[in-house]
Image: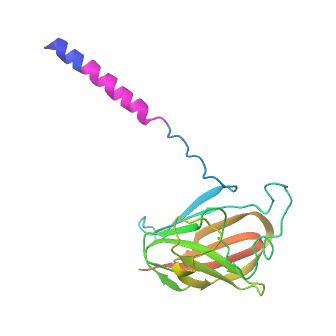
Amino acid sequence: MQKSIATFVVVFVALFGASLSNAQQPAPKAAAPAGRVSPHETVSQVFDGRRDNRIVLTYGRPYSKDPKTGEIRKVWGTLVPYGKVWRMGSDEATTLTAQVDFSLGGTALSAGAYTLDLQPEADGSAKLIVGKRLGSWGVPYNGAASEVARIDLKKSAVADRVDQFTIKIDKDPAGGGVLTATWENTQYSAAIAIKK
């Protein structure tokens, strides 16, 4: 009896130890999809101190510096043409996922996943295009049929030049927050409010 218990313990420890060592191995990193040039980032923000009030944004972060030549490119009006829809980042379409109903720039949106595109204009105005073209490559823009809303953005200048396109979701201490997209010396923004 003691021999069978000892055998059981040895087998159990061997199996448990093997499964534990396998579980602690880091998962291999997935290769970036073909065609990606820019790094990607995921940002998230929790509102009102509740973890189920989270908004998550995933996007590609291109540089103003040309990846092939190293030359600094003019962004607004050149790299990102005026009057045309831009994927608001690089590579795959930028995605925003909300766990709760919310509003963006005063437009009510239901909890769920969306794509974000931007259409800047030469007069300084810009529209944030909220759509449902999930999983698509960013260009060419073919999402008109899946658009949910077009939202006016506020444009402002930034003092220090931003080389890498950056999107942030910041909280406002008074409630809600703001989504900002900054590149070169320009920032576009829209208020975020969580439905109570």
Query: Which residue occupies the foreground of this view, 70 or 68?
Result: 68
Residue drawn where x is 22% and y is 20% of the image: 8
Instruction: Give the magenta part as a residue range.
Output: 9-25
Is 50 within the magenta?
no
The front one of 124 and 30 is 30
Q: Residue at x 78, y 84 (%)?
A: 122
Q: Nearer the viewer, residue 150 or 46?
A: 150
Scheme of image coloration: rainbow
Task: Give the percent coordinates (x, y) of residue 13.
Answer: 31, 23
- Looking at the rendered image, the quarter that the C terminus falls into is bottom left
Q: Nearer the viewer, residue 96 or 134?
A: 134
Q: Magenta-highlighted stretch: main secondary structure? A: helix
**Residue 76, image quadrant:** bottom right
User: Which quadrant of the figure contains the N terminus?
Assistant: top left
Q: Residue sitting at 58 percent across and 84 percent down?
A: 150
Give the farthest residue toward the top.
3
Residue sitting at x 71%, y 61%: 62
